[in-house]
Image (cartoon, rainbow, N blue to C red):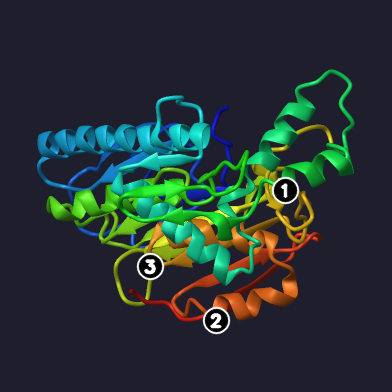
């Protein structure tokens, strides 16, 4: 099954040269700054989403070689987390319910997902995959009800869901329930983004913009000014709702993720989409979108998904668990609520 394509209404604006054919909706402040090396830009796809990397570095051949290393690392990590590659570590775990000697990255991300499930009282649940599979199968049938599967079918799928039954350590991952399966679509893009950022930092690249479905910024842009990000209106993607400065400075947040039901709609009803509430078996429709800034893209990714699902009354207690996270909510009327949550900073 292909990885859910959670299309992000997130535009990261660098420079006209870096954006290429993409429409530039935001301009950086300080456009007359002293000249600096023109950025090296890569565009492609990663984890089912359009992707790009922008490296500001005086040695262009070195930057190009570094991009090749990053692309190879993305491919390696897809072989761990992908749901559509039958030989991936995650696919093998789901096929048998147990995986011995799992890759360290899978152990780390499953463990993080379980911690987020615990913190959100199961609103985020990596074992929700049987429910998603049910919806995909339902809408693949001609004449499928636009409201989704029947209540009985949902109840049966929910019997295979339960994060508390998952056992994980460095030697083995075991799912615990018959027919259980894990999806990491709610966190994998952020995790891969962080791994690429860490690889770049370790090799001396301190001014970088990464967009692998989630945004992560290091240092500053080619004009010496902060990287800028715009969150677009889900109802009108050509219109920006608000913008933020991203980067490594203490007053900035390094990572930004946005989630919304527009990412993957199963049928003609926009209310039936991939952001599933495991407790009800139906799509969560509290907001049009949720955006989160955090020190790491993994956390921003996971929380943007989670905050889309938890009831609005529970969002403040959940955010209190993560003091360096801030969130913006676009309500059903298109109004932006936020920022909600802690302070800007770094872990």
Return the residue nearer the eye: 142 or 324.
142
Residue indicated by mark 2: 320
**Element at label 2:** helix
Outermost residue toward the top? 142
**Distance (Cα) linking label 2 and label 1:** 31 Å
The image shows residue 322, relative to residue 309, as above or below, that is below
What residue is shown at x 66% (from left), y 59% (from top)?
Answer: 308
Quarter of image, res 29: bottom left
Question: In this image, 109 relative to 321: left or right?
Answer: left
Where residue 114 appears, x then y in whole percent? 50, 60
Question: In this image, 252 relative to 61: left or right?
Answer: right
Residue 256 visible within the image: no
Quarter of image, res 258: bottom right
The image shows residue 63, relative to residue 84, as above or below, that is below
Residue indicated by mark 1: 159
What residue is shown at x 11% (from left), y 38% (from top)?
Answer: 62
**Distance (Cα) linking label 1 and label 3:** 35 Å
Q: Nearer the viewer, mark 2 or mark 1?
A: 1
Quarter of image, res 347: bottom left
Q: Residues within 10 Å of mark 1 (few under 14, many from 20)?
A: some
Q: Residues within 10 Å of mark 2 (few under 14, many from 20)?
A: some
For marks 2 and 1 on the same chain, the one whose residue lies earlier in the sequence: 1
Return the residue nearer the eye: 28 or 130.
130
The numbered disc on residue 295 is: 3
Return the residue nearer the eye: 243 or 62.
62
What residue is shown at x 29% (from left), y 67% (from top)?
Answer: 248
């Amino acid at each position: 099954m292909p990885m859910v394509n959670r299309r992000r209404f997130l535009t990261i604006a660098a420079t006209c040269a870096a954006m290429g054919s993409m429409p530039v909706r935001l301009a950086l402040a300080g456009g007359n700054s002293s000249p600096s090396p023109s950025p090296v830009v890569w565009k492609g796809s990663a984890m089912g989403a359009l992707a790009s990397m922008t490296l500001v570095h005086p040695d262009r051949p070195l930057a190009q070689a570094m991009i090749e290393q990053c692309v190879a690392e993305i491919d390696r990590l897809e072989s761990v987390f992908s749901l559509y590659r039958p030989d991936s570590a995650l696919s093998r775990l789901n096929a048998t319910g147990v995986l011995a000697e799992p890759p360290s990255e899978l152990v780390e991300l499953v463990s993080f997902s379980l911690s987020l499930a615990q913190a959100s009282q199961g609103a985020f649940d990596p074992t929700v995959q049987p429910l998603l599979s049910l919806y995909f199968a339902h809408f693949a049938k001609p004449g499928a009800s636009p409201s989704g599967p029947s209540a009985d079918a949902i109840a049966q799928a929910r019997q295979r869901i339960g994060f508390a039954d998952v056992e994980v350590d460095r030697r083995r991952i075991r799912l615990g329930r018959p027919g259980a399966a894990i999806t990491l679509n709610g966190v994998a893009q952020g995790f891969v983004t962080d791994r690429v950022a860490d690889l770049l930092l370790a090799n001396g690249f301190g001014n970088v913009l990464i967009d692998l479905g989630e945004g992560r910024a290091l240092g500053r842009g080619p004009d010496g000014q902060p990287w800028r990000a715009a969150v677009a209106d889900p109802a009108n993607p050509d219109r920006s709702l608000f913008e933020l400065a991203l980067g490594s400075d203490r007053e900035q947040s390094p990572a930004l993720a946005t989630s919304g039901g527009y990412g993957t709609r199963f049928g003609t009803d926009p209310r039936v989409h991939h952001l599933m509430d495991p407790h009800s078996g139906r799509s969560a429709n509290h907001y049009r979108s949720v955006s989160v800034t955090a020190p790491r893209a993994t956390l921003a990714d996971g929380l943007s998904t989670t905050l889309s699902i938890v009831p609005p009354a529970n969002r403040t207690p959940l955010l209190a668990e993560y003091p360096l996270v801030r969130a913006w909510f676009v309500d059903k009327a298109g109004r932006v609520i936020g920022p909600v949550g802690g302070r800007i900073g770094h872990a």
